[in-house]
Image (cartoon, helix red, strand yellow):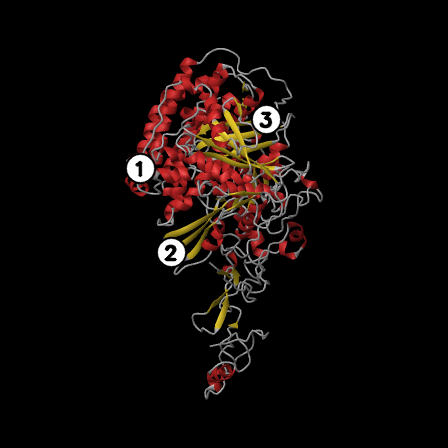
Amino acid sequence: MTTSHEGPRLRQQSQDDPRVMLDIDAGAFEPVPPYPPRTEREAEFYTLGDGEMFLNMGPQHPSTHGVLRIVLKLNGEQVVDLDPVLGYLHRGVEKISENSDYHHIVNQLDPLEYVSALFNEWAYVMAGEKLLDLQVPRRAEYIRVLSSELLRISSHCLFMGWFALDLGGLTPVLWSFIERDEIVEMLGALTGARMLFNYFRFGGVNGDLNHEFMSRLGSWMSRAASHVEANTRLLNENEIFVRRSRGLGVVDRETALRMCMTGPNLRATGVPFDVRRAHPYSVYPELDFDIPTRSEGDSLARYLLRVDEIKQSLRIIDQCLHQMPDGPVMAKIPRKITPRPGRAYAAVESPRGQYAIYMMSDGTDQPFRLRIHDPSFLHLQSVGLLMPGNLVADTMAVMASLDPVMGGVDK
Amino acid sequence: MDRALRRRLEARFGDRLTGPVRQRHDETEIRVGPGDVPDTLRTLHDDPSFRFEFLADLCGVDTGLVMQVVYHLWSETTTDWLRVIADGLSRDDPRVPSITSLWKGAEWMEREAYDMFGITFEGNRDLRRIYMPPDYTSFPLRKDFFLADDAARSPGAGVRHQEQTHTPRNAPPGRAIRVAKEA
Amino acid sequence: MAVNDRAGHSPGGSPRVAGDGDAEAHRDLPPETGSDRPGNGPAALERVARRDIMAPIVVPNTLWQSTNPAAYDGGRPAEITHLREFGLTDAGRRNDARWGALEVIPTKADIVLDLLRANSLWPLLSGLACCAIEMMSAATSKNDMDRWGMFPFRASPRQADVLIVAGTLTTKMAGPLIRLWEQMPEPKWCVAMGDCTVSGGRYKRSYSTVEGIDRVMPVDVYVPGCPPRPEGLIYGMMRLQQLIVDRRGQWATRPIGPTTPEGV
């Protein structure tokens, strides 16, 4: 198929006198790239059909996912196709990690999925422990699970808030941020920082539980169930919310597997794949929890699934507190870490899906290659399949229901 | 460590493997040549004794001597992660057949490997840059792309490669450019 | 209808309504903007008919011009200039699109107006990365920025006063962010939140980040931290309010320029 590419329109025939051509200054900002299309998909996308137009949801827009640019091809109000443009937050973390010591990298990986930073660290230290053949003390494992599940609850609360915000509700965000603030203050008492924790280490965690953390945790746990119930009741019974999200962005099982989706987005389509059960790590085999699964695959199912996961996380935290063993919180490792030359792959179940680190070591104290596999990257790929046929206003709703975090997508 | 998996892999792919099947902790690793990648992965995906239907990761690696493409797969039949390494790509013109026909989700991962290493995936319908601006000329994660110790000494001094946001006002008017489809 | 030939005739002068018996009656009318050649009226069609009308006639859009010399004391064409040149040229000094000939008054009115602006700064939503979450946390119930009047985070730069850049600025995003900054109407202030915007932070070595937004735009308040606590951001905004009040009336003549020395 041969296509003709003319670039953005800078001149337009005047409606008053067809012999006259007017300058359009706005044509300079059209989302069509100023070079001829380089790939088949680009040619197919940037060719307008009959009655179609482009709309650019630019890197800055009020939705709170971060800097993502989506070029929509619209037929009136309906989206025909869309092309996400990434890279506005690409910070070169992998390259910086190749030039850093192993200890520094724990802090470097935090800002990737900044909403749930401990999972990034966890995958990394698991891969390092495989290369170092380290055994992690059981108390450290329980603390890791405890703090990570707290952060999972916080991340899911934020998801609820942002999903409602993209559908137009302003109150749930405020309630979610109250929950998030309490959890994050707790973790700040434990780790020292509110958001980019830098807490996990090879062989354990940085510091033991302390009084302030336990007192905050205790008082929060006594209110947690009722707070979660109140927050979710705000949305579950809201007619606008339910009617807008039901049947929106339906993913079926085969599509989800083909698009390599993981996490709640995959479980909402009926595939009960959870890394904690499929490929158990840490002390999850000793803990008793369910994997919520739904089969509708629409945005409402994804939302309700995350609410169920919050309840399961509360269960896990309860068991951790009851079964917490005594002992050291960190194994003895040398100050300069030189793992054996080799490769290691470690995956954890982050609130968004499977978060994995593939590490190659060459025997020195800097990793040779650090590959970060982020789940939101693949979920954004699926937006192009879910959107056609929907209206423009539903674009952000579908994106919010997939819960992407651009820090991880762009690395 | 799944010994049975190793035996099955050696039995099935013995002739195509370019190295021994390695196992450590909970990972099994096989190496194949770049041309064998689609067949191998399709066999692993379709064969009822393997059923590796879940592609966990796709990445590129630059070892300094050769380039590699690494795939991670998961199956319900085994407790191990399977790592398939397409070994032996040249550093000057690395080419691998694309697996987007098997997993459409690999499209963006291959785009990222192209953007960071320059590995061309033949058959990927959308092989353009994903992280860097479209007019960027280097491949950042290669080993010959050196990260300066101090950004002030890097060529762009911290501000460069700003995306071209619009056609310059004095540019000549666009012509109809025909993009021929390659047979 | 005025048909202007683009071959270089500038608008100005009065058109002659050729071939019209009421030419004397029209002489007292104010001249229209348009070419002074006899290009209007029925005679114009004859002339054009002899030319090749299949080729489009490209004309500048005279329906509305932002640089119309009769409006707003002359406009400044919008162009993206580097900060170094901006400070040295007259463009950095001029308070355009305001008040026309009454340039003395805005300086005096700003003394009062800045007191009002300080208590009602509307930020532009420019959350790029992790600091955006702490900015949102500063705006929500527990640490409430609405107490200082900063609740409405405007989505459109045309309605915003202060640009809080929260998160790492990459070279790809630098273009759109500068465009946002230029779209904001004056007076405007900029707050660099987080280590990445102050100096590049943990990404100082990266190949694709801008080491500090003061390389591309003038910053008024730097809020360090990775990420800064919400209370830290609120402290920064309170200092910005103090700064606006202390320097009231001086926004139009404020010194701007690169704060990063050459070669750093």
Q: Earlier in the sequence, mark 3 or mark 1?
A: 1
C-beta proximity under 8 Å, tags 1 and 2: no
Respond whether the residues carrying marks 1 and 2 are from the same subunit: yes
Q: Secondary structure at mark 3?
A: strand
Q: Nearer the viewer, residue C210 or B132?
A: B132
Q: Which mark is residue A342?
A: 3
Q: Chain of mark 3?
A: A
Disc sitting over residue C81 in the figure = none
> Which chain is disc 1 placed on?
A
| Tag 1: amino acid | Glu
Dot 2: element: strand
- Residue at position x 70%, y 41% in the image: B153
* A61 up-or-down from B48: above or below: below
Amino acid type assigned to the residue bearing label 3 in the image: Gly
**Label 3: few (<14), some or many (≥20) within 10 Å?**
some
Residue C93 visible here: no
Residue C255 placement, left or right of B179? right
> What residue is disc 2 on?
A75
Residue A72 shows in this picture: yes
Tell me the quarter of the image containing the C terminus of chain A. top right
Q: Residue C210 in the image: state x and y as whole percent.
A: 61, 42
Please state which of the two labelled residues, at mark 1 or mark 2, is closer to the viewer: 1
**Label 1 environment density (alpha carbons within 10 Å; few <14, some 14–19, many ≥20):** some
Which tag is nearer the camera, tag 2 or tag 3? 3
Residue A294 on image: x %, y %: 32, 33
- Residue at 58%, 41% in the rendered image: B116
Q: Could you say where residue B129 lies in the image, as x and y percent from the top left?
A: 55, 46
